[in-house]
């Protein structure tokens, strides 16, 4: 049984107690302690900056050309915080409760409560850094709603919240670089962990420009490398997003938890053809104002504007009157799939539903006319005013939609369909964010801890920054306090040499295959297997088939992949090959985890386990645990369980009706 | 939207590494759908090159949503191609027609050396931010966020400046390879907000000094940067930077 090291005592004082009793490192000793941070998204950048501020010697790594490019930048809608600025009944407890419920009771209570406790500090910190959040005319911060909640607690910066938060963390990071507390290694990819006497003591990284392998020592290593949604090939992740760092950690003894918990986001621009390289999200914030519908008639080929009101099925409002269009993501995605599978889909592919802003434009137009004391204005004038308001709220998203599809969403409803977006699973960590390898930590999307089986909108940014700004600075001290006598270990230590030669061999092997098919060929095939058999709906037979198919594909990859160029130069195909090789292993584990979890919960929908009206049916008696998998060898994983204990929230059938 | 397929001729800059002289290579792109993004067209071309046993074209890209700032192609003489306010990854092939010849080059600027083919080194931008593109506030020092009301108009202007994605198109578009639009966007964002006030003078002076040190050219107000900026960062930010810089130079005590 796994020990999560959750502090004793009542839920709402655990974190206070922990902070009051954890070990500290004095400033002089901090200067001698080195910390490696992998990834510079919200979690990595905020951790590297905060640890640098404390005086630790930090080395940060990212594969992009600058730390500012990490994919947190693309987060659109917002960040949650229990500020209760709207006086609408919000509190730390409510944010905690919504998150545990939204995660379908598969998250760890103590972590989620801590997340809710520090959520307010994040907003304060970001504002102090100059993050330009949206404001009201009185100069105070503005809020909006997101799915799975009934309060307005989401802070935002138009549809570019992730960008603004990341640039805040990035500027804090660059300040530490300037001060010499952080050394930044851009265009570097971590390719292995170095373990000495059972503890994480460094990494092997490849300089992506020169192809040189480098050894780096650290008293601790932080994996902040994001999620693994790209295992599906098509996802809303960036092209470079990958599981490699987390997977190398897994192969070095860190357990991988709940790999099958994948979030399929309901509102993305549908696939347009075989050439598609990625999918683009349309922020959940659009569901504040957009209404989702399909025609009431099957195979209706009329244009949206030709379908009269009474022939439209606003199926989310119909099925879930309490939350309507703002049900959580897993629920909204399944409902869209259900309508499309039943023949009500729209567009050429019939794999899409409408997201319609006509009602919102008219409503905002009327409000604006009233505000300006305009009376007896024409409908056109109202619509014009309304469009201006909508443009201010969502302009960049509408522009993006228009560029990609060639259609004007102010005039015709958007066509949307679910797509892979986020992965709740990840490296298993305890309350201190430490993996099962001492000295190896994981933060942000790369870990598994806070979102259970489904993440609520605007909670990823919150978790990444909570882990980096407010959790790790305390918990890492508790470990490093016992490491102050450990001098920097020589890079000539055999453990470094072994790890480096292992990495060198793998690269040489990849380069020597000289097969006939590109890396993308294999990646696309893997993605199709995953989407068809381990996607929005899963069943026993499909998962068993998928495992066989992935094994066969992996064998073919290692026999027939073609990587052009040289290993000692800038070689993007070689980078991709290494990442796809890891996805080919992870994909199998995801299917195995999905097969093991014979219940439906959150984003994991086993067709064998559903209620009479098609909702996910949990099996708390048998599956109220975190499934943490230990790597033992190719295709060989051992399951360890962390039982989930709910002291505060009573798990029940999740209802948004 | 009407879909169509097209055949194109590409003239692409190929350069093995920083020290290589580089040259244009002519390639054919066949059966390109009007629904593809410009980078998806490159994916198709690269797949063909790999299948023919040749080296694919190296280019920077990541989010493909127009926000990370990684993509950086100079297309037919324009940074990020023919559409206004658009990154290369968001440019779609509808912009072209059957039989077109498209010339694709990397960003051309002394401060952005070529890494390979269309990939350049923009680390100079990071170093400019290091020189002062931040507010010095350690984690944990902040007061309650709503203790500091900010005029909505100023907050909106700060946000518009903060929308910069650091792609470098402004430098590539400028005949002098000036980085003024990039620097002014960050200086403006922080100068417009009360949080940025304490370090206002040193920020303007230090960031401009670093910009000069990196070898970017001078600004002669031609406005090419604004015209090519995918995020439509306004030229008025440069005017603000000039005010900040001159004001700081005249009043600073150091």
Image: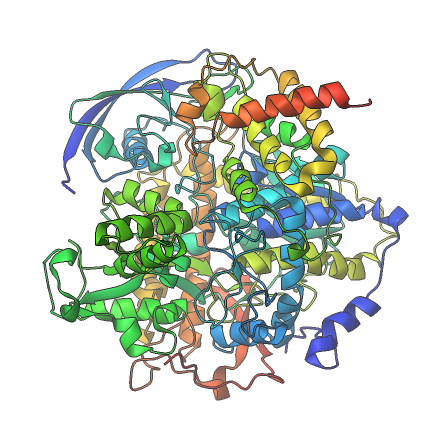
Q: Is residue A370 visible?
A: yes
Which percent across, then down, holds residue A505?
54, 41
Callout count = 0
Residue drawn at point x = 50 percent, y = 52 percent:
A243
A47 in relation to A345, above or below: above
Image position, residue A586 (x, y; %): 46, 58
Q: In the figure, residue A185 lies in which quadrant?
A: top right
Q: Residue B194: image x %, image y %? A: 67, 42
The front one of A601 and A551 is A601
Residue B134, above or below A226: above
Q: Residue furthest bottom?
A: A621
Residue A441 visible in the picture: no
Residue at x 50% of width, y 35% of height: B164
Image height check: is A568 above or below B110?
Answer: below
For the C terminus of chain A, which image quadrant? bottom left
Report the side of A48 relative to A342 (left or right).
Answer: right
Residue A5 image-quadrant placement: bottom right
Q: Residue at x 58, y 36 (%)?
A: B189
- Residue A650 sits in which quadrant? bottom right
x and y percentages locating residue A526 in the rendered image: 34, 54
Q: Tell me, what colour scheme is on the image? A: rainbow
**Residue at 51% across, 78% down:** A105
Along the line of sight, the residue nearer the viewer: A589 or B244: B244
Q: Quadrant of the N terminus of chain A?
A: bottom right
Apparent side of residue A486 relative to residue A113 in the rendered image (left or right): right
């Amino acid at each position: 049984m796994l020990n999560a090291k959750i502090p004793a005592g009542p839920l709402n004082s655990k974190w206070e107690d922990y902070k009051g009793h954890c070990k500290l490192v004095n400033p002089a000793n901090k200067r001698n302690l080195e910390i490696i941070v992998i990834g510079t998204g919200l979690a990595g950048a905020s951790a590297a900056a905060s640890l640098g501020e404390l005086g630790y010697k930090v080395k940060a790594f990212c594969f992009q050309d600058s730390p500012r490019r990490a994919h947190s930048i693309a987060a659109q809608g917002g960040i949650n915080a229990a500020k209760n600025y709207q006086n609408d009944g919000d509190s730390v407890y409510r944010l905690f409760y919504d998150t545990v419920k939204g995660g379908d009771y598969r998250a760890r209570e103590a972590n989620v409560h801590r997340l809710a406790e520090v959520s307010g500090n994040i907003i304060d910190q970001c504002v102090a850094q100059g993050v330009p959040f949206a404001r009201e005319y009185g100069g105070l911060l503005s809020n909006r709603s997101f799915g799975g909640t009934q309060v307005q607690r989401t802070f935002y910066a138009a549809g570019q919240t992730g960008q603004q938060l990341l640039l805040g963390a990035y500027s804090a990071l660059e300040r530490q670089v300037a001060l010499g507390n952080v050394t930044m290694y851009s265009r570097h990819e971590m390719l292995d962990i170095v373990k000495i006497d059972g503890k994480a003591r460094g990494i092997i990284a490849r300089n992506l420009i020169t192809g040189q392998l480098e050894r780096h020592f650290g008293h601790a290593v932080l994996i902040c490398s994001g999620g693994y949604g790209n295992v599906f090939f098509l996802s809303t992740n960036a092209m470079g997003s990958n599981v490699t760092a987390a997977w190398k950690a897994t192969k070095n003894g860190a357990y991988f938890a709940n790999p099958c918990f994948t979030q399929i986001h309901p509102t993305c621009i549908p696939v347009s053809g075989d050439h598609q390289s990625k999918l683009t999200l349309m922020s959940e914030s659009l569901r504040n104002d957009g209404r989702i519908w399909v025609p009431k008639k099957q195979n209706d080929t009329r244009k949206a504007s030709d379908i009269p009101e009474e022939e439209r099925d606003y199926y989310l409002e119909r099925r879930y009157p309490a939350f309507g269009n703002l049900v959580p993501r897993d629920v909204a995605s399944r409902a869209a799939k259900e309508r499309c599978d039943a023949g009500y889909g729209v567009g050429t592919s019939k794999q899409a539903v409408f997201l319609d802003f006509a009602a919102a434009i008219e409503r905002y137009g009327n409000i604006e006319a009233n505000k300006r004391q305009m009376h007896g204005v024409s409908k056109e004038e109202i619509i014009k005013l309304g469009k201006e308001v909508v443009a201010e709220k969502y302009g960049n998203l509408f522009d993006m939609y228009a560029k990609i599809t060639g259609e004007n969403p102010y005039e015709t409803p958007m066509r949307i369909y679910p797509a892979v977006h986020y992965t709740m699973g990840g490296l298993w960590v305890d309350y201190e964010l430490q993996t099962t390898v001492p000295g190896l930590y994981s933060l942000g999307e790369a870990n598994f801890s806070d979102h259970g089986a489904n993440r609520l909108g605007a909670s990823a940014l919150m978790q990444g920054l909570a882990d980096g700004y407010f959790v790790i600075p305390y918990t890492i001290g508790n470990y490093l306090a016992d490491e102050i006598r450990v001098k920097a270990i020589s890079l000539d230590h055999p453990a470094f040499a072994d790890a480096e030669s292992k990495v060198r061999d793998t690269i040489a092997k990849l380069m020597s295959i000289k097969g006939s098919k590109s890396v993308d060929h294999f990646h696309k095939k893997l993605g199709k297997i995953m989407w068809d058999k381990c996607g929005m709906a899963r069943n026993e037979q499909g998962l068993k088939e998928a495992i066989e198919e992935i094994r066969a594909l992996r064998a073919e990859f290692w026999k027939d992949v073609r990587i052009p160029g040289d290993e000692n130069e800038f070689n993007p195909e070689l980078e991709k090959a290494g990442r796809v090789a890891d996805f080919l292993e992870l994909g199998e584990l995801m299917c195995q985890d999905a097969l093991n979890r014979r219940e439906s919960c959150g984003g994991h929908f086993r067709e064998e386990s559903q209620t009479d009206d098609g909702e996910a049916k949990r099996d708390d008696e048998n599956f109220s645990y975190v499934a943490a998998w230990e790597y033992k060898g190719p295709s060989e994983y051992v399951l360890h369980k962390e039982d989930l204990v709910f002291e505060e929230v009573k798990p029940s059938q999740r209802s948004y009706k | 939207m009407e879909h169509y397929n097209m055949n194109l001729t590409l003239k692409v800059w190929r350069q093995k590494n920083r020290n290589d002289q580089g040259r244009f290579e002519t390639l054919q792109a066949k059966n390109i759908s009007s629904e593809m993004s410009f980078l998806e067209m490159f994916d198709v071309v690269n797949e063909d090159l790999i299948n023919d046993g040749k080296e694919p074209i190296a280019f920077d890209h990541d989010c493909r949503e127009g926000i990370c700032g990684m993509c950086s192609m100079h297309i037919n003489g324009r940074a990020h191609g023919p559409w206004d306010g658009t990154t290369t990854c968001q440019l779609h092939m509808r912009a072209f027609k059957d039989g077109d010849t498209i010339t694709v080059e990397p960003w051309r600027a002394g401060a952005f050396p070529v890494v390979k083919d269309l990939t350049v080194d923009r680390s100079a931008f990071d170093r400019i931010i290091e020189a002062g593109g931040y507010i010095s506030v350690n984690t944990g020092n902040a007061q309650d966020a709503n203790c500091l009301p900010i005029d909505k108009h100023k907050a909106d202007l700060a946000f518009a400046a903060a929308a910069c994605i650091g792609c470098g198109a402004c430098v590539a578009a400028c005949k002098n390879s000036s980085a003024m639009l990039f620097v002014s966007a960050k200086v403006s964002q922080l100068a417009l907000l009360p949080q940025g006030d304490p370090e206002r003078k040193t920020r303007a002076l230090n960031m401009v000094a670093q910009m000069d040190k990196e070898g970017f050219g001078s600004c002669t107000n031609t406005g090419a940067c604004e015209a090519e900026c995918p995020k439509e960062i306004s030229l008025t930010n440069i005017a603000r930077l000039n005010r900040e810089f001159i004001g700081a130079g005249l009043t600073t005590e150091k």
